[in-house]
Image (cartoon, rainbow, N blue to C red):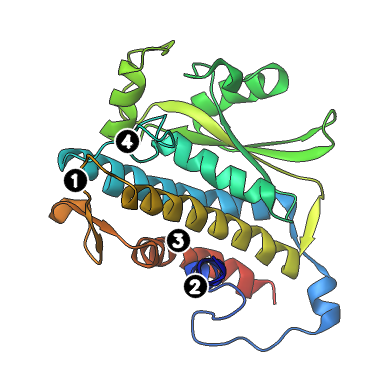
């Protein structure tokens, strides 16, 4: 168990390379004073982590769920049940990330909502419902301060980026909308944080918290596969479902995320130095 924890920590820090490596090497160590200075507004930080999330979820949805289904892999909302041999659907992958973040020390909130959710508990109301109407029109992020919760809040469009999203929602027995199309704004990911600005150190903590959440849920999926008794287990290694009945290891999956997302994030972090 301890070895697994260490492995997860190593992977999490390798996902983004944050604070360890920059575009050309190892940055000079920041002074204690510099790391305590307010480096980013909360809007900037939430946009950074939202971009990381977009890349991660798109990769998981298209390369794992979409391609995996073509290989006979199953994905189900009840994937954690003992008698269900399947992986998490994209929305549940996000929920797993959110759960991991919530259990950690970083006060970052994450959830997914919609005006036509499969789960009624995820329906937007009040201020968020108003802002989501605007997001559906222009797909631009919306920021506001939630007076009730005392949290700075950011909402980002969640698009139907893959056929797997569309078919799953259209065919779901509890769906309240069955004519979704590729490219539709299906909902919005909502991020929350209590402070209006963050130090460099706090910003790194937010990004690493998300990275760890990704590690946790993906490794939980791989652990689920190990427990399969009836279904054929995909081979876990360096290959992806598009090549056959394969799944990438957590390291391979997250290395792809890092390559796709982290350059822009690193540019913003380095620019603050």
| Residue 135 position in % (x across, y down) | 55, 28
Question: Mark 2 and mark 1: span between their CA atoms?
Answer: 31 Å
| Residue 103 position in % (x across, y down) | 68, 49
| Mark 4 or 3, nearer chain start | 4
Reading the image, the residue beneath label 2 is 14
Q: Nearer the viewer, mark 3 or mark 1?
A: 1
Q: Image quadrant of residue 78?
A: top left
Q: Residues within 10 Å of mark 3 (few under 14, many from 20)?
A: many
Question: For numbered disc 3, what is the local secondary structure?
Answer: helix
Q: Image quadrant of residue 106?
A: bottom right
Which residue sits furthest front? Answer: 229
Question: Mark 2 and mark 4: span between their CA atoms?
Answer: 27 Å
Question: Mark 4 and mark 1: span between their CA atoms?
Answer: 14 Å
- Indicate whether 92 appears above or below 260: above
Residue shown at the point (54%, 59%) measured from the top left: 211
| Mark 3 or 1, nearer chain start | 1
Q: Mark number for residue 36?
A: none
Reading the image, the residue beneath label 3 is 261
Q: Are marks 2 and 3 in contact (CB under 8 Å)?
A: no
| Mark 4 or 1, nearer chain start | 4
| Mark 2 or 3, nearer chain start | 2
Reading the image, the residue beneath label 4 is 75
Reading the image, the residue beneath label 1 is 232
Residue shown at the point (34%, 37%) measured from the top left: 161
Q: Residues within 10 Å of mark 1 (few under 14, many from 20)?
A: few
């Amino acid at each position: 168990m301890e070895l697994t924890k260490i492995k997860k920590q190593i992977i999490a820090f390798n996902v983004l390379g944050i604070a360890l490596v920059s575009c050309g090497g190892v940055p000079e160590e920041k002074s204690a004073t510099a790391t305590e200075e307010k480096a980013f507004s909360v809007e900037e930080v939430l946009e950074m982590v939202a971009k990381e999330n977009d890349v991660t979820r798109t990769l998981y949805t298209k390369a794992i769920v979409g391609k995996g289904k073509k290989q006979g892999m199953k994905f189900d909302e009840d994937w954690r049940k003992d008698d269900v041999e399947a992986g998490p659907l994209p929305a549940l992958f996000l929920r797993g990330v959110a759960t991991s973040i919530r259990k950690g020390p970083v006060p970052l909130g994450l959830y997914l909502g919609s005006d036509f959710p499969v789960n009624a508990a995820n329906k937007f109301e009040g201020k968020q419902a108003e802002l989501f109407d605007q997001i559906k029109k222009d797909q631009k992020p919306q920021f506001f301060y939630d007076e009730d919760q005392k949290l700075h809040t950011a909402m980002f469009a969640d698009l139907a980026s893959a056929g797997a999203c569309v078919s799953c929602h259209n065919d779901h027995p509890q769906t309240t909308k069955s004519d979704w199309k590729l490219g539709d704004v299906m909902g919005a990911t909502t991020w929350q944080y209590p402070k209006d600005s963050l130090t460099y150190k706090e910003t790194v903590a937010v990004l690493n918290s998300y990275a760890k959440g990704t590690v946790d849920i993906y490794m939980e999926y791989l652990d689920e596969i190990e427990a399969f008794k009836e279904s054929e287990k995909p081979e876990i290694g360096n290959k992806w479902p598009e090549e056959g009945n394969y799944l990438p290891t957590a390291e391979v999956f997250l290395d792809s995320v890092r390559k796709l997302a982290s350059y822009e994030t690193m540019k913003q972090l380095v620019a603050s130095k």
